[in-house]
Image (cartoon, grey):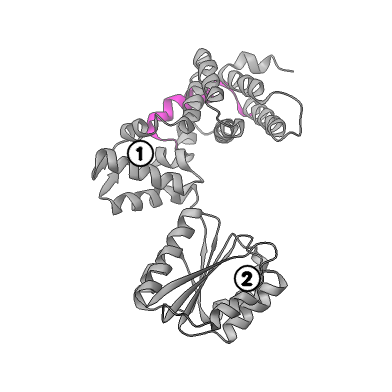
Amino acid sequence: MKLPPQQLLRHLQQQLAPVYFVTGDEPLLVQESCDAVRGKAREAGCEERVVMHVEAGFDWNRLQQESSALSLFARRRLLEVRLPSGKPGDAGSKALQAYTRDYARDNVLLLIAGKIEASARNSRWYKALDSIGVVVQIWPPGAQQLSGWISQRMARLGMKAEQDALTLLGERVEGNLLAADQEIEKLHMWHGPGAVTVDEVMAAVADSARYDVFGLVDCTLAGDEIRIVRVLAGLRAEGVEPAVVLWALLREIRALAGMAAEVRHGNTAAQALARHHVWEKRKALVAKALRRHDDSGWLRLLQKATRIDRIIKGLGAGNPWDELLQLCLQMADRARLRAVP
């Protein structure tokens, strides 16, 4: 039986299946789903937990041995198998199929895997687990769903954020739900339950070097060249990875290239900003940058960012910090970009 993670708690309130297979590459959601299974197993009498890490040389016979072994300390046991690769191999496939055919009914198997390939869902071992247990396949929420996810997490703590605050926080933590959860906890610790404004979100993340990359983006869009040099030097001194800086710049360049293309095809700047969900307090800043370059200019900047990515990965010659500075200055000044052949 397949269940989305948001339905797992309701299922566990009603029953405890003999097998749970939790798979995905979003650590927070995987951890919470596994904790829910562990908690229910403890309530059901699984007082002993046996953890097996599938690494190079792992003997899959251990799974059957642990399943049939009698415990001196507990009537029921939770057998936890951690499979980071999501690929059990031939021996693992046979062991998992054998387990589902002859499992000790007093035990619960929790198999935890990384993201699995689509082809794995047609494998015999996957179908065997699905036939007697619960498969929880976890996908991180996309950019469109992230605000809703953050809003739900805040609601659990009695907090309610205005839409711009949700959008801002989503931009800051996109792709990292663990960071999102930590920021929500920090906001709750500072402000307690109640309304959360965009200014409070900005203040809460202002002291984190990780979020200074967004300050760099803003001063670049504003065309503030003196501040660009200062912030970029600060990020370098604090040990922020060039890849993180490039990621923040690149996502902004892509968005602006898309908006500039819409303007060239007849849409107004306001329409383009609305279609790309630019939150209210950033509209003036983004609109200023949008007037600075047309879509061909933003595409040139996108090409430069791609070259910087190759330099960071060691596939091209150059100093990534020097290149990032030039990229920011060209984003900030139309004349600098036009001067480049």
Toward the front, the furthest residue is: 72
What's the amino acid at mark 1? Ala
Q: Nearer the viewer, residue 310 or 209?
A: 209
- Tell me how far mark 1 sits from mark 2, CA to CA: 39 Å
Q: Is residue 135 magenta?
A: no
Q: Provide the residue designation for mark 1.
A: 165
**Residue under the point 64% across and 60% down:** 85
Q: Residues within 10 Å of mark 1 (few under 14, many from 20)?
A: many
Residue 338 is marked as none
State which region is magenta: 278-295
Disc 2: which residue: 121
Residue displayed at 42% across by 45% down: 180
Which three-letter amino acid code belongs to the residue tagged 2? Arg
Q: Quadrant of residue 330?
A: top right
On the question of residue 1 being in view, the answer is: no
| 333 w.r.t. 247: above or below | above
Residue 182, percent from left and from top = 39, 44
Query: Is disc 2 surrounded by few (<14), some (14 to 19) or many (20+) residues within 10 Å?
Result: few
